[in-house]
Image (tube, rainbow, N blue to C red):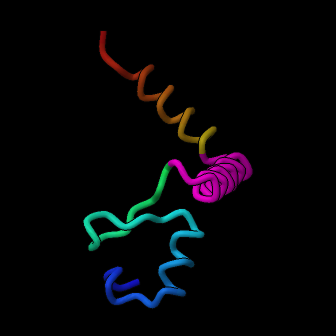
Amino acid sequence: MGRPKELSEEERQKLLAEGWKPIQAEVWVPDWDNPVFRARLKENCDAINEADRRSGELDRLSDEVAALWDDLPG
């Protein structure tokens, strides 16, 4: 994704449609006000949360932290 001034108009429009906006005509950052970006972010977060739920890793980590807490002196 080069600098905006190196992008074709088609590439620029694609980035805008995906929820990106140029800053200082040099760097593209997520546009948090763009509903497309926010929807994609929610989809990604939901997928991550579902993967964590299915893996059982969060339960394992919770057990580890509880065991550490129980081992604290005092």
Say which residue appears at 60% left-offset and 41% top-offset.
58
The percent position of residue 27, horizontal first and vertical second, equals 30, 70
The percent position of residue 10, horizontal first and vertical second, equals 54, 87
Quadrant including the C terminus:
top left
Say which residue appears at 74% left-offset and 51% top-offset.
54
Furthest residue toward front: 9
Is residue 37 located in the magenta-colored stretch of the structure? yes
| Numbered range of the magenta stretch | 33-57
How many numbered tags mark residues here? 0
The percent position of residue 23, horizontal first and vertical second, equals 31, 63
51 displayed left or right of 34: right
Is residue 9 located in the magenta-colored stretch of the structure? no
Q: Is 70 above or below relative to 63?
A: above
Quadrant including the N terminus:
bottom left
Query: Is residue 27 or residue 72 the one in the foreground?
Result: 27
Say which residue appears at 53% left-offset and 40% top-offset.
61
Q: Is 45 above or below relative to 64?
A: below
Q: Is 18 above or below relative to 42?
A: below
18 displayed left or right of 65: right
